[in-house]
Image: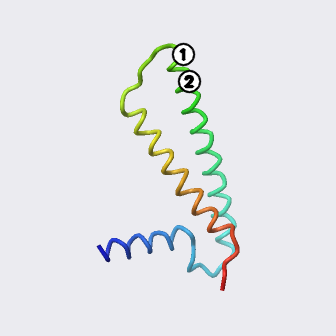
Amino acid sequence: MRKLNKLADLCWEALTLQHVPHKEVVIPYLLFFILTFIFELFLSLLFIFSFFIFNHFGYKPNYQYYISGGILILMLIVTGSAGTVLLLPKKQ
């Protein structure tokens, strides 16, 4: 279990660029996170819109539709939390 926790910590440190000293790398990475977050918001709005359209016409989607919604929520959580860590000033 400790190895899994260490692996998760290393992945989080890599995702939030904690060991990158060059600021030239951080700005494009921030732009990538902002565009990713905007795209995920678009996909979530599309998911919600399709849900209402499906209910209006009486169509029952299969379980892959609902699994993709859960994955989209997890992606939004990870992107949002990593983006806030990147944008907030670091405490020394």
Name the residue rendered at 32%, 77% in the picture. Answer: 2
Neighbours of disc 1 within 10 Å: few (<14), some (14-19), many (20+): few
Q: Secondary structure at mark 1?
A: helix
User: Relative to 80, does residue 13 appear above or below in the rendering?
Assistant: below
Q: Position of residue 79 (x, y in %)?
A: 56, 56
| Whether residue 28 is situated above or below residue 44 in the rendered picture | below
Q: Residue sitting at 68 percent across and 59 percent down?
A: 31
Looking at the rendered image, the quarter that the N terminus falls into is bottom left
Q: What residue appears at the point 33 percent right and 71 percent down from the top-left corner?
A: 4
Disc 2 target residue: 52
Q: Which residue is mark 1?
A: 56
Q: Nearer the viewer, residue 5 or 24?
A: 5
| Residue 22 at x, y percent in the picture | 65, 79
Query: Which quadrant of the structure image shows residue 17?
Result: bottom right
Who's the residue at 60% across and 51% down the image?
Answer: 36
Point out residue 30 in the picture as x, y percentages from the top left corner.
66, 63
- Mark sitting on residue 70: none
**1 and 2 marks in contact (CB < 8 Å):** yes
Identity, as a three-letter code, of the amino acid under mark 1: His
Q: Residue furthest bottom?
A: 92
The image quadrant where one finds the C terminus is bottom right
Residue 44: image location, x then y, percent: 57, 39
